[in-house]
Amino acid sequence: MLIAALITLIPVLIVILGVSALFSAGETSLTAASRGRMHQLERDGDKAAKRVNKLLTNQEKMIGAILLLQNVLNIGAAAIATISIDRAIPGPWGAAISTGVMTVLVLVFAEVLPKTLAIMRPEDTARFMSRPVMWIVIAFGPAINAVQWFVRAVLGLFGVKLSMEVDVLAAHEEIRGAVEYHHDEGAVKSDDRNMFRGVLDLADLDVSQIMVHRKQIDMIDADLTTAEIIEAALSFSHTRVPLYKDNTENIIGVLHARDLMAAVTRSRGDVNSVDVMAIIREPWFIPDTTNLKDQLAAFLKKKSHFALVVDEYGALQGLVTLEDILEEIVGEIDDEHDAVLTSLRKQADGSIHVDGDMPIRDLNRAMDWDLPDDNAVSVAGLVIHEARTIPEPGQTFIFYGRKFQIMRKQRNQIMAIRISPV
C-alpha cells in the first residue's frame, strides 16, 4: 500500500518540487548576480539582463513573490503527500513518514541542490529565470504589497519606521565590501584596493585632511626685486607659488612659473622690466570644510589646479592642489623635480621611524595598517589625541596594538616617532 501510494505521488511531486526548485535557483541567482555585469549586458542590448536589472530595483518585492510561490508549492506538496500516505498508513506513523520524506525531498531537491547550481553560474541562471520570475512578480504583486504594508504596520507598533523606499545596502558600502572581500581572497592587489578606497572616500574627506599646512607652504615676498622673485620661484620644485605682502597671511596673488618665464622672454632678458604684479593670478580661497569630491569637481569646472584653504575666520590654513586629491586615489605622484622625502624609514628590528607630520592615511597605505584618522590627520596628531598631552622625547605610549615612542621634538611640534609592535 505504501509503495503504491509513493508511486502515485512521484509524478505530482516531481512537477511541484521541480517548479519550486527552479524558482529557488532564480532567487539565489538574482541576489548573487553581479549588478555591474548585468548593467554592462543591458548596455550591450541583452533583454534578459534588462529584466534582471528591473527586478533588482525592487528586490524586496521580487523575493517576496518567489517566497510566496515556494511556500504554496512546498506546503501543497507536503499536504498531498500526507493525504496519500495517510490512506496507506493511517495515524501518527503515516504523518511521521510523510513529514520525514517531504523534509528530505524539499531540503535536497527544492533548496540545497538548485541553490548550489545557481551559485555556480549566477549571471546565466538569473538571465534564464528573469522572465518566469517577472511573471510571478506581476501575478503576486498586489498580495506582496499587502504583505509589505502589514509588516510595516506591525513594526510601526514597536517604533520601527520603514518607508517603502528603504535601501538596505548603500551602493558605496556594497562596493567597498566587495573590494575588501576580494582583497582578502587575493583577487585584488593592495594597490588596487587602495585606489578603490580612495575614490570611495573622496566624499568623506575634507581638504583640511590632505592640504599642505601653512607652515610648509613655499611663499615669495612681493616686495622683493624681480630678479629675487625669479630666483626664488626657480628654486622651488613646483610651478605655482603664492605671493604675500607685509605678512604671510596676506596673499595677494599666485605666480605661475610659466607666466613668469613668458614675461622674461618677452622682455628679451631684461628681468628688471618685468612687472610681476601684472602677471600674477588672483588667489582662490576655499573653506577648510569642503569635501574632496566637491573640490575635485570645482577644480575641473574652474580649470584651476591650485586653491588656498582658510578657516571660518578667514585665516590661512594651507593649500590644496588637484595633484593632492589625485594622490588620495593613486598614491604619491613624483616627477623629476620633486624632492625625495623619506617620511617613513623601516628599521632592521621591525620597527619604523616616521616624521610627525606624516599623514595617517599615507602610513596606513604604506604599511597596510588601519590606524584611525577621524580625530587627527598626522601621526603626531594621533599621538597627541590619544595621550591627551604634548609628550616629551623618550615617552612611550601604547595604543591600537602598537608602541609609539617620541624620538625628537622641536618646541611643541613632534618631529619624529618610532613605531614598533607591542
Image (cartoon, grey):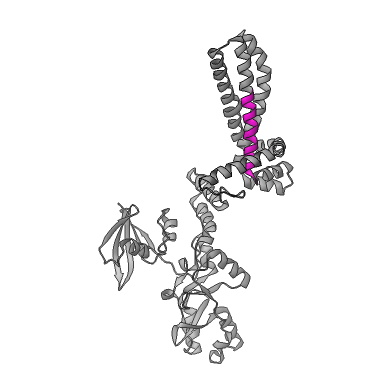
User: As rendered, which of 324 and 144 lies closer to the eye?
Assistant: 144
User: As rendered, which of 274 and 218 lies closer to the eye?
Assistant: 218
Dominant secondary structure (helix, strand or loop) of the stretch shown in magenta = helix
Kindly identify the residue that appears in the image at 54 percent across and 19 percent down.
100
User: As rendered, which of 112 and 252 lies closer to the eye?
Assistant: 112
Quick one: which residue is furthest to the bottom in this view?
273
Place of residue 260 in the rendered image (x, y in percent of width and height, measured from the top left): 56, 83
Kindly identify the residue that appears in the image at 50 percent across and 78 percent down.
241
User: As rendered, which of 421 and 302 lies closer to the eye?
Assistant: 302
Quick one: which residue is furthest to the front in this view?
157
Place residue 48 in its image quadrant: top right
Which residues fall within the magenta stretch? 57-76
Place of residue 77 in the rendered image (x, y in percent of width and height, measured from the top left): 63, 22
Place of residue 30 in the rendered image (x, y in percent of width and height, measured from the top left): 63, 39
Q: Is residue 178 left or right of residue 367?
A: right
Asked whether residue 33 appears in the rendered view, the answer is no
Quick one: which residue is furthest to the top in this view?
1
Quick one: which residue is furthest to the left in this view?
394
- Relative to residue 230, is residue 380 depicted above or below? above
Kindly identify the residue that appears in the image at 46 percent across and 66 percent down.
209
Place residue 390 in its image quadrant: bottom left
Residue 29 is a magenta residue = no
Quarter in which the N terminus is drawn = top right
Asked whether residue 323 appears in the rendered view, the answer is yes
Q: Is residue 245 left or right of residue 104?
A: left
Place of residue 383 in the rendered image (x, y in percent of width and height, measured from the top left): 34, 62
Place residue 415 in its image quadrant: bottom left
